[in-house]
Amino acid sequence: MSVVASVVNPKICLNLSDPSITWIHRAGIAGLWMTLKQLEKLYPIPAERPGNLSWLLTPRSISLEWQGQDFVVLDWLLKQSFQINEEGLILLTGSNTHSINIETQINIHLGITRTFLQHNQVFKFDGEKSWTLIVDGIEIDVEYKKAVSYAHQHFAKQLCDKEGQFLQQSIGVVGWLYPGSVVRHVAFTQKTKFEEKPQLAFALLYAPVACHYFVLRSHTQPQHPQYAVVIPEVTNLEIYAQQYWNLGNLDYKHSHVSSLGDAALRFLTYKTTIELAIPQGYFILNVDAIW
């Protein structure tokens, strides 16, 4: 049973109609929507959450409100949203972790650590682990770095001031949070760095939750595959979340592509296969949002 909260004085408001946001912001809003929907199952009553945290979810917007120190609430929310399981795999609450198999979990983990979290300053690990998967009756070993922590879990410190209150001024945003955002000129860092409003930076944290990841095999270096991440352009939060969850588990072999175009085509194909379950729903794939 979930309780629909009534948000009177929201601390954070996010809307797909905001003209200042991009496709990756919208993906982040979708990832946050998915996460909050899953957290409703774990903590159905606001009193069970720090600061009586409550939210209102509509097909195009999210509103959050709480009481007390902002840092305490945001830190709890981020740590609930971005976890690590006993196998050292990144666990995204919004992906409906209880319904996905180990193959999908490994693919998400590798996808995120090879794209958003490539740098060792934002992803800490303790050794590697090998997991044996059966693909077409053949055993293959898939290796991944065992996560200890990653930047998303601790970002509340960047969102709040020394008193623990939500920042009012813009904050610097780097590549792991918004791919492609870099300082244009090192000699003029303050004037050429990428900045974002705190609540939009908060939304960007959740973009990896709504994305899909594909193994991009190299023809010249087959032992060192890259990853392609497909970022959808979301037009309806509720419908997109249901489509993502309905897509469910994909066998490891179905996550392999030969090119960026192949990743886009496969994603569209997989999406089409579930549209019968939600005939009224649609969202548009931004094919340019693949790397």
Image (cartoon, rainbow, N blue to C red):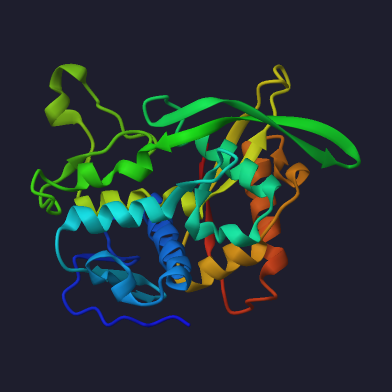
Residue closer to the observer: 126 or 90: 126
- Where's residue 29, x and y in %? 38, 60
Q: Is residue 152 left or right of residue 265?
A: left
- Where's residue 224, x and y in %? 66, 21
Note whether residue 69 is visible: yes
Residue at (28%, 63%) from the top-left corner? 18
Residue closer to the observer: 175 or 122: 122
Above or below for 134 versus 60: above
Above or below for 245 versus 124: below
Furthest residue toward right = 137
Note whether residue 22 is visible: no
Q: Which quadrant of the figure has residue 15?
A: bottom left
Q: Is residue 209 left or right of residue 250?
A: left
Q: Is residue 253 left or right of residue 31?
A: right
- Where's residue 9, x and y in %? 16, 75
Above or below for 105 versus 12: above
- Where's residue 183, x and y in %? 25, 27
Q: Is residue 170 left or right of residue 13?
A: left
Q: How many marks?
A: 0
Above or below for 120 versus 97: above
Residue at (46%, 48%) from the top-left corner? 83
Residue closer to the observer: 62 or 275: 62
